[in-house]
C-alpha cells in the first residue's frame, strides 16, 4: 500500500479513480511482457459474435484473470511448436540428433532443465520434465515413501486438491496400511486457512510416526502460501521426508527448493507457467540424491545413463540427478510449448514478477474494499498469498456476480457454493484488468 499510495500522490490521482490504474499500467516496467501473449477477445470468450469485427466492445481484449487454472498462450510457444512440427515433417527421426534450430530432440530435456531451474531456486541437475503432475507425485512417493512399523504416516492438508488426496490414499493402500496412515492437518474451527504454528505443532507431536510430509506450496482453494522453508526444516528435524506439490506456486512466487533442502517437489506447468492445457509436468529432486541408488525409484530406459544408454544393456546405471527419474523420453510437442513459455520467463525474474504481483493483489484488495465492502469476504491471507485472491460472496448473489463477469468477458473461475478465484498474473495482467473486474462485481451487486 505504501508504494501504491506514493504513486497516487506523485500522479495526483486518487487510488480509487480508474485513471490511477491507467497510470500504473503506463509506468509498469513489465508491461512489454503482455505483448508476448495471445489475449483472447471478449467475443471469443463469451461466444457472442454479435459485436465481432465491428469495432465494438466484443472486439476488445478480454480481462483474463484465470492464470491460476490455465495460463494464456505465449506467442513463442506457438512458434516453437510449429518449428518442431516442421522439423518432424522435414527430417523425421533425424531430428533427434540434427535439428534446423539447434534443438536436437535427444537433448531437449537439458534445455528445459536449464531454463526452468532458476524459477524454482534449483540447479539444472535437480529438475526435469515428464508426465503429468499426479503421475510424478506417484513416482516420487514410490521412491521416497518407505513406511516402517514405526514411521508410516503421510501428512497432508485436510483440504488438499483431490488428486493429491487420492494419490496419497492409494499409496497407503498399495502398501497395505490402514486408512489412518494419512494424517490430515486441519484449520481451526471457523477458519479457512492453516496456521503455521499449528502445522509445526502437529509435526512435533506426530513426527516420529510420519514418513512423508507433502503439502501444496499454495492451497488451491484459499490461495494461502504455506511457509515452505519453516515446514521443511521442522519436518526434516523429526526425520521426515518433505515433498511439495507446487501446482499453484510454479511461476507464481519465488521458491528456493535447493536452499530450503526440500527432498522432492512436483508441479504442473499449464497454470502460471503457460505451457498449455494438460502441459507436461515438472519435478525436483534435491542434489544430495543425485547418485543415490538406495531409492526405490521406478525405472525406465530414459533414466539410464545417457553415455551408455544406446548400448542397450539390461544393467541399469542411473542418470545423474533428476534425469535418473525420467522413465520415458521427452515428449517433444508438449515440451516445445513449455520451452516457449520459459523463454518468456527469461526476459524477467521471479523477484520482479513477484513485486508486480504484490502490487496487483494489493490494488485488487483495496478496490474491492472501496467498491463492494460488506458484500465480499477475502479468505486469502494478506501476508501469505500469491497472485490469487479467493472471494466469498453471499450465496443468493454469487451466481449473478459470476454470470455478470462472464458476460463482460472477464474470465475467472468459481468454486461452488460461493467462491470466485481471481488471479491477476503479472506476466500479462494489468491494473486496468483489476479495475474492470471490480467494477463489474460492483454493478452486479446493485
Image (cartoon, rainbow, N blue to C red):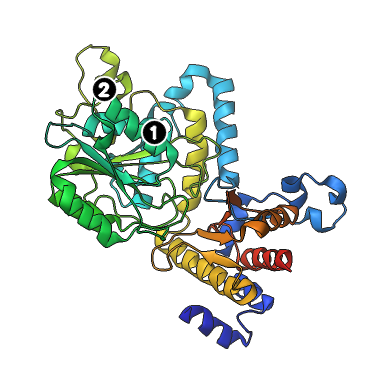
Q: Is residue 332 left or right of residue 399?
A: left
Query: In the picture shown, does residue 153 fall above or below 36?
Result: above
Q: Position of residue 249 (x, y in %)?
A: 41, 51
Front disc: 2 or 1: 1
User: Can residue 386 be seen here?
Assistant: yes
Residue 65 location, quadrant? bottom right
Q: Residue at x 56, y 87 (%)?
A: 10
- Secondary structure at numbered mark 1: helix
In this view of the protein, which residue sits in the foreground, 46 or 4? 46
Q: Is residue 184 left or right of residue 5?
A: left
Closest to the observer: 214 or 293? 214
Q: Residues within 10 Å of mark 1 (few under 14, many from 20)?
A: few
Asked whether the viewer can see residue 324, the reply is no
Furthest residue in direction front, as rendered = 189
Q: Who's the residue at 42% across and 49% down the image?
A: 250
- Neighbor class of circle 2 (other Cα within 10 Å; few <14, some 14-19, many 20+) is many
Q: State whether residue 368 is above or below residue 142.
A: below
Q: Which residue is mark 1?
A: 166
Label 2 and label 1: CA atoms lie apart by 30 Å
Q: Which mark is residue 18?
A: none
Q: Please name the residue that numbered disc 2 is placed on.
A: 304
Mark 2 or 1, nearer chain start: 1
Q: Secondary structure at mark 2?
A: loop
Amino acid at each position: 500500500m505504501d508504494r501504491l499510495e506514493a504513486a497516487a500522490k506523485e500522479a495526483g490521482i486518487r487510488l480509487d479513480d480508474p485513471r490511477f490504474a491507467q497510470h500504473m499500467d503506463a509506468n509498469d516496467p513489465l508491461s512489454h511482457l503482455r505483448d508476448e501473449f495471445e489475449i483472447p477477445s471478449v467475443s471469443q470468450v463469451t461466444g457472442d459474435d454479435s459485436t465481432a469485427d465491428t469495432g465494438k466492445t466484443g472486439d476488445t481484449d478480454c480481462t483474463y484473470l484465470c492464470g491460476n487454472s490455465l495460463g494464456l498462450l505465449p506467442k513463442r510457444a506457438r512458434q516453437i511448436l510449429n518449428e518442431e512440427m516442421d522439423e518432424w515433417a522435414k527430417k523425421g527421426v533425424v531430428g533427434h540428433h540434427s535439428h534446423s534450430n539447434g534443438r536436437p530432440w535427444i537433448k531437449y530435456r537439458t534445455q528445459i532443465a536449464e531454463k526452468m531451474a532458476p524459477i524454482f531456486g534449483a540447479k539444472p541437475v535437480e529438475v526435469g520434465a515428464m508426465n503429468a503432475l499426479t503421475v510424478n507425485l506417484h513416482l516420487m512417493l514410490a521412491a521416497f515413501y518407505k513406511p516402517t512399523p514405526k514411521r508410516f504416516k503421510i501428512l497432508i492438508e485436510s483440504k488438499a486438491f483431490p488428486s493429491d488426496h487420492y494419490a496419497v490414499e492409494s499409496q497407503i493402500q498399495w502398501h497395505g496400511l490402514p486408512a489412518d496412515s494419512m494424517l490430515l492437518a486441519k484449520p481451526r474451527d471457523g477458519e479457512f486457512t492453516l496456521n503455521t504454528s499449528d502445522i509445526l505443532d502437529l509435526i512435533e507431536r506426530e513426527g516420529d510416526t510420519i514418513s512423508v510430509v507433502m503439502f501444496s506450496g499454495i492451497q488451491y482453494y484459499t490461495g494461502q502460501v504455506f511457509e515452505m522453508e519453516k515446514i521443511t526444516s521442522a519436518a526434516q528435524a523429526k526425520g521426515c521426508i518433505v515433498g511439495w506439490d507446487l501446482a499453484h506456486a510454479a511461476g507464481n512466487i519465488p521458491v528456493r527448493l535447493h536452499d530450503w533442502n526440500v527432498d522432492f517437489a512436483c508441479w504442473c506447468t499449464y497454470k502460471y507457467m503457460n505451457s498449455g492445457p494438460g502441459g507436461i509436468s515438472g519435478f525436483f529432486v534435491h542434489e544430495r540424491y543425485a547418485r543415490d541408488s538406495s531409492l526405490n525409484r521406478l525405472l525406465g530406459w530414459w533414466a539410464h545413463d545417457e553415455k551408455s544408454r544406446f548400448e542397450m544393456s539390461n544393467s541399469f546405471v542411473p542418470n545423474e540427478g533428476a534425469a535418473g527419474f525420467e522413465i520415458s523420453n521427452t515428449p517433444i510437442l508438449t515440451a516445445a510449448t513449455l520451452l516457449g513459455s520459459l523463454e518468456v520467463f527469461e526476459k524477467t525474474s521471479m523477484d520482479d514478477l513477484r513485486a508486480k504481483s504484490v502490487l496487483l493483489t494489493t490494488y485488487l484488495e483495496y478496490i474491492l474494499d472501496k467498491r463492494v465492502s460488506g458484500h465480499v469476504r477475502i479468505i486469502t491471507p494478506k501476508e501469505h498469498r500469491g497472485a490469487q485472491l479467493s472471494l466469498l460472496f453471499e450465496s443468493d448473489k454469487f451466481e449473478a456476480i459470476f454470470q455478470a463477469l462472464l458476460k463482460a468477458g472477464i474470465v475467472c473461475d468459481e468454486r461452488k457454493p460461493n467462491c470466485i478465484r481471481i488471479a491477476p498474473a503479472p506476466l500479462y495482467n494489468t491494473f486496468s484488468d483489476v479495475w474492470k473486474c471490480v467494477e463489474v462485481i460492483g454493478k452486479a451487486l446493485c
